[in-house]
Image (spheres, grey):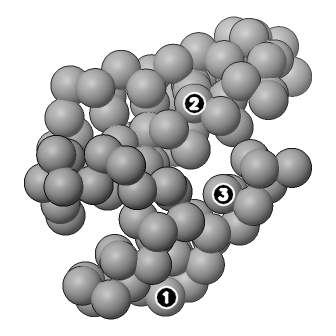
């Protein structure tokens, strides 16, 4: 797949999955865009690391006060989100898999 084809793929996913839009902090948006750019350039490890950082940033922004959680690791953040929200358990399991993969 060429870089241009990867961009088309990312844009199709955006259209399919983001119906109705999504609200992200500016930092989460920056990290998400960085992950897309890395993926399309073929820098897959960078894409994974940037995607994880974007997810972590969004969870902190959406569900917690950033000051209270700034010393929490990603694992603790996932545990607390699981306790405090009604996010789908499959989604949280996927996020946990991303965390484990990132750590390897």
According to the image, label 2 marks what residue? 50
- x, y percentage for residue 63? 19, 64
Mark 1 vs mark 3: give the one in front.
3
Q: In the image, residue 78 lies at what x, y percent?
A: 46, 70
The residue drawn where x is 74% and y is 11% is: 41
Q: Nearer the viewer, mark 2 or mark 3?
A: 3
Q: Is residue 98 above or below residue 14?
A: below
- Element class at badge 1: helix
Q: Is residue 68 visible?
A: yes
Vertical placement of residue 51 versus 33, above or below: below
Q: Toward the viewer: 69 or 89?
A: 69
Q: The N terminus lies in which quarter of the figure?
A: top right
- Where is 68 relative to 89, above or below? above
Q: CA distance from mark 2 to mark 3?
A: 12 Å
Residue highlighted by disc 1: 89
Density class for disc 3 (Cα within 10 Å; few <14, some 14-19, many ≥20) is some
């Amino acid at each position: 797949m060429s870089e241009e084809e990867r961009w088309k793929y990312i844009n199709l996913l955006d259209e399919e999955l983001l119906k109705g839009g999504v609200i992200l902090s500016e930092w989460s948006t920056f990290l998400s865009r960085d992950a897309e750019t890395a993926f399309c350039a073929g820098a897959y490890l960078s894409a994974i690391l940037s995607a994880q950082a974007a997810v972590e940033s969004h969870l902190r922004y959406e569900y917690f006060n950033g000051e209270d959680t700034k010393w929490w690791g990603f694992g603790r953040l996932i545990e607390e989100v699981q306790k405090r929200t009604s996010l789908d358990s499959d989604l949280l399991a996927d996020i946990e898999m991303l965390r484990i993969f990132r750590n390897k």
